[in-house]
Amino acid sequence: MKENTFGKRLLKIAVYAMLVFWALVVLFPFYWMLLTSIKSYGSYNAEFIPKFFTLSPTFENYVSAFSAVPLAKYFLNTVIFTVATTALMLVIAIPSAYAFARLEFKGKNLLFLSFLALMMIPTELVVITNFTTVTNLEMRNTFGGLILPSAASVFYIYLLKENFEQVPNELYLAAKVDGTTDFKYLMKVLVPICRPTVVTVTILKVIECWNSYVWPRLITDDPAFYLVSNGIQEIRENGFGRENIPAMMAAVVVISLPLIVLFLIFRNKIMAGVARGGTKG
């Protein structure tokens, strides 16, 4: 009995040691980014062997991040793009998921299978098609051209559909007997019940939009429409130069901070929503 207890404790210690090790591996790049951002240009270049701490932190790099390039403008553009795209995605995804989960119409299964098949298409092919379409519509260097191609997501429709189907069908039948419309049932009953998954989808879309790089880089060549992710290249080439790594790291910290805070606040809802949305029954 004692040997069995000792073996369980040893296994538990080994598991926690492995988790701590991987946590350090994952968090180290963030620590190094933050540490580099508070080092002066001179002290950073004077380090022949990188130091894992600094005795003379400085915040001048953060001042430079907002003065060398219009980083505040990039933030505003990104907020507009993120909010508009996420809102439009929810307007499309929630009713679509509800239709596939609750409504009966001819060809529903075939249509949903076709939707899932779209997930198998390489992103590069979709980008080429979207670029041609947006260019032909003369929507380059506009927020409309940035937003529309990212407004719909098959994955989020699938995730919401799976979650909606977990709600007992008796609630839907009872609501219909009471004369409740499908839209009212969706907004008053289904969405509140499935709020963790809806919140998760919203947060994941916000992160996706905030980190978007390839599409904004292709469709915009006007700095007035640059996002923070695309502004990094301008920061590197026109702002601080390729050698001023501490100033670049300060800009990256500023850009990354909103997402880190968002994840820390809603991490439990994200985990619960993904787990609930991917479980049937």
Image (tube, helix red, strand yellow):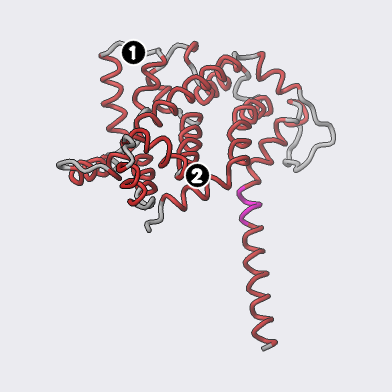
Which residue matches tag 2?
A: 196
State whether residue 276 is above or below residue 216.
Answer: below
Report x, y in % for residue 229: 52, 26
Q: CA distance from mark 1 to mark 2?
A: 35 Å
Kindly check if marks 1 and 2 are in contact, taking CB atoms under 8 A apart as contact: no
Check if residue 208 falls in the magenta segment. no
- Dominant secondary structure of the residues highlighted in magenta in the image: helix
Report the side of 65 relative to 158 (left or right): right
Sequence order check, earlier mark of 1 and 2: 1
State whether residue 168 is above or below residue 137.
Answer: below
Which residue matches tag 1?
A: 139
Q: Amino acid at mark 2?
A: Pro
Residue positioned 48% across, 42% down in the render: 195
Of all residues shown, which one is farthest toward the right? 55
Residue positioned 69% across, 18% down in the render: 64
Residue positioned 67% across, 24% down in the render: 247
Of residues 96 and 105, which is closer to you in this image? 105
Magenta range: 22-26
Q: Amino acid at mark 1?
A: Met
